[in-house]
Amino acid sequence: MPLLRFPFRAQRLRRKLPSLRTLVILGIFLTGTTIAGFYIGSRFIQPIHLQRFNSFAELVYFIQTHHSSNQGYTVGEPFGGGWAEDTGLAATETGAQGYSTTNVQVEGVDEPDHVKNDGTYIYTITDEEVVVIRGFPAEELGIVCRFQPIGSPNTLFLYDSSRLVVISTIFSDLVEWPQPKEVAIEVFDVTNPFNPQLDQQIRVEGEYLGARLIDNHLYFLANRWVTDDNGTIVLPSLSVGDTDIVIPANEIYYDAGTYDYSFCYTIVLGIDVTDAAAPPEIETFLGGRSTSVIYTSLTNLYLACARYPIYTQGLEGTNTVIHRCKIEEGSITYEASGQVSGYLINQFALDEFRGHLRVATTSWVSSSSPNSDVTSSTEMQVSNVFILNMHLDIKGRLEGLAPGERIYSVRFMGELGYLVTFYKTDPLFVLDLSVPTHPSLLGELEVTGYSDYLHPLSDQYLLGVGKDVAISEDQSWWWYQGVKISLFDITDPCQPEEPFRFTIGVRSTDSALLHDHKAILIHSSRQLLVLPILLAEYPENITNPPPYEYGEYVWQGAYIFHFDLSNPTLTLLHQVSHISNCTALADDPWFFRPYYINRALYIGNILYTLSNYKLTLHDLTDFSNLGEVIIDPTPNP
């Protein structure tokens, strides 16, 4: 990892609030969009008006005339994924014995993952196959079926223990470098898990973007470049069973203000997974590059992508464009578009609440003021929260938080919002969003390190998982250290506290949770927290290593904690690994990756830990080993 150098003030563990707010925060501004656009700070923002093409010739002309233009906007690289009012738990206790489900952002909106279970059977992906495992009871443990979908499987959904949705990538025939060519959606009837039967098959030209499942309706998204391998502009297409469908130009939305060096289609499908005879609903958008973030509430699907002005000095003109589609019983209807300043960190930066969309962004602003906290460059990053109505007009805003820092994690919880930014310390900001036109800052807490992921354990406590950091003696730069787990006391939103923190390992230590929110398991009734950890330590012969020294990998597996919120603490109860010879991990960590535990789940009183090649079972009372399933026959390293 390259050395990160930033200028620092000598002391900043407790920020001087009056000075920061007076000099940097731009304040709360009330505004609304009009047909003529609006201002963000001193920048005029063009309105977003989507329309449909009248003909294919008009579509071709638009792409040709808006390609590599010297005016207008260009859409940048994807920034990641969306978030909303959540369950507060990574697992639900349903069924006769209770079992965990995927950790999702919005209650009632399922998200895809490479493992699903229904309290009896566990469905997972290994290499090119889908594997069905009898997981409960433990006495009947074993693989009952394995099958290969039409493509290389990416992710799964399970509906009502009767329909398994498998989303796969179909690659081109290029021998040296196969490219994604199509995305396949296959719905299998798994009423009899021993013999899944293909019920539906849809193939979409392009690459998989994302999907959500609400009841029995799947909302699926894919991106497709506007040109084929020969550079010819083509229309997007898909096949439903044996029927080929080409989406006509007069059904494709576009924004006349979009300019870019490359364009692609975003195809949105609504599919009833229980009715193979029902045709899919289709909505299609033409944009620069690709949609980068999707967020779905129970009634709306949002598409977001970042835009940069082509000719600016730096990144100060970065905006995020958002489109809203109403969804209901599989139908998809485009309704509104808007934009805000800055870019999104991931899907959790979006949240729908009481008829408004809350959006957290990081943006670039000029830092030419001599009183600025950061004076080494002409631009610096700040954090913002915008509140939009259902027309996606900005109704309230709070801008300029955390000068010189960017957002690392976001959590919206009802009328409150929580932001974690990072520069050398980890400021946790608490925001009052109860009045959409008047968002305000309630309190903040600064501690060392940062949190990549926030998760509510109760109304009073918030879990933060990220990295600890070490600051150089001259305060001029910092280095990542081990994985940091924090318990934040948010009882008083004006004065949040960190009563407990725990650091795992040294520099190089990592966790899948820092990159994928589905990697966490929280068993609320037992107060258990399970995290996958790749542990690094310093060799015994190294004493007092400098903070930039990387540790050696010594272990990978699941850490199992008990959390006590009455006296906020985390206690390590047990560790589980799928690697029998961890001493060789430092020599070739890549070789062991198929045995890296990346998911944990529970059914009844059994904890299951999953890697690509193995599933192990442990009793949740004493963590005794109850058995294992070898998913892939490759010898255990």
Image: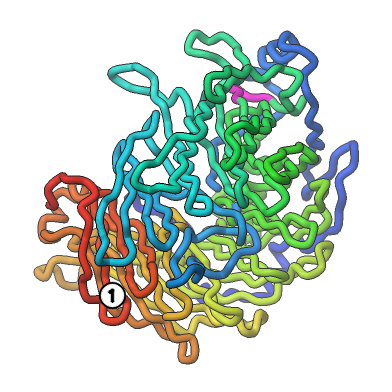
Q: Position of residue 285 (x, y in %)?
A: 68, 29
Residue depicted at 30% across the width and 62% down the height: 609
Residue depicted at 37% across the width and 69% down the height: 530
Q: Which image quadrant for residue 386?
A: bottom right
Residue depicted at 50% across the width and 30% down the height: 201
State the extent of the magenta-drawn residues as a range: 259-264
In the image, taking residue 45 as reference, residue 348 lies left or right, namely left
- Residue type at mark 1 is Asp
In the image, taking residue 305 as reference, residue 440 lies left or right, namely right
Q: Is residue 297 above or below residue 255?
A: below
In the image, taking residue 100 as reference, residue 54 lies left or right, namely right
Q: Specify whether residue 9 is in view.
A: no
Q: Is residue 494 above or below residue 304?
A: below
Specify the principal SS of the magenta part.
loop
Q: Is residue 287 above or below residue 294?
A: above
Q: Is residue 261 magenta?
A: yes
Q: Which residue is mark 1?
A: 619
Secondary structure under the numbered disc 1 in the rendered image: strand
- Considering depth in this image, is 530 or 438 the residue closer to the camera? 530
Residue at the far right: name it.
Answer: 35
Q: By what rule are the colours in the image chosen? A: rainbow
